[in-house]
Amino acid sequence: MANQIFVSPSGDDWKVKVVGNQKASAVCDTKAEAVEKAREIAQNQRLELLVQNLDGTIGWRNSYGNDPRHIKG
């Protein structure tokens, strides 16, 4: 079972892909569109969202479930 979804650059577009899936869940024209789509999927499937920068580094991440941290706050 996958637990992460990535937004990553793909040529001139942005790809939304769940780890473990062969095909992208979505291909969007802008990073903002891709993040919005990925956030919806992450919330519905309780995944961790990772958003890459143009250079491939992780820009930011957010967990929408299955958070391993057991400390309140």
Image (cartoon, rainbow, N blue to C red):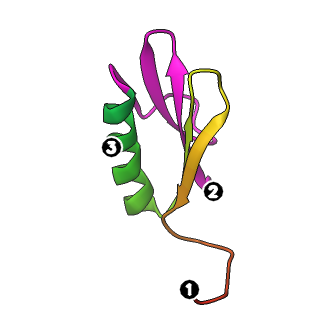
Residue extent of the magenta highlight? 1-30
Q: Secondary structure at mark 1?
A: loop
Q: Which picture quadrant has residue 22?
A: top right
- The spot of residue 69 in percent (x, y) is 68, 78
Residue located beneath label 3 in the image: 36
Q: Looking at the image, is mark 1 or mark 2 earlier in the sequence?
A: 2
Nearer the observer: mark 1 or 3; the answer is 1
Q: Looking at the image, is mark 1 or mark 3 earlier in the sequence?
A: 3
- The spot of residue 6 in percent (x, y) is 55, 39
Residue located beneath label 2 in the image: 1
Q: Secondary structure at mark 3?
A: helix
Residue located beneath label 1 in the image: 73
For residue 37, side relative to residue 15 (left or right): left
- The spot of residue 51 in percent (x, y) is 54, 40
Q: Which picture quadrant has residue 26?
A: top left
Q: Secondary structure at mark 2?
A: loop
Is residue 7 one of those drawn in magenta? yes
Amino acid type, callout 3: Glu
* CA distance separating discs 1 and 3: 25 Å
Amino acid type, callout 1: Gly
Q: Which picture quadrant has residue 32?
A: top left
Q: Residue at x 39, y 50 (%)?
A: 39
For residue 47, side relative to residue 34 (left or right): right
Number of marks drawn: 3
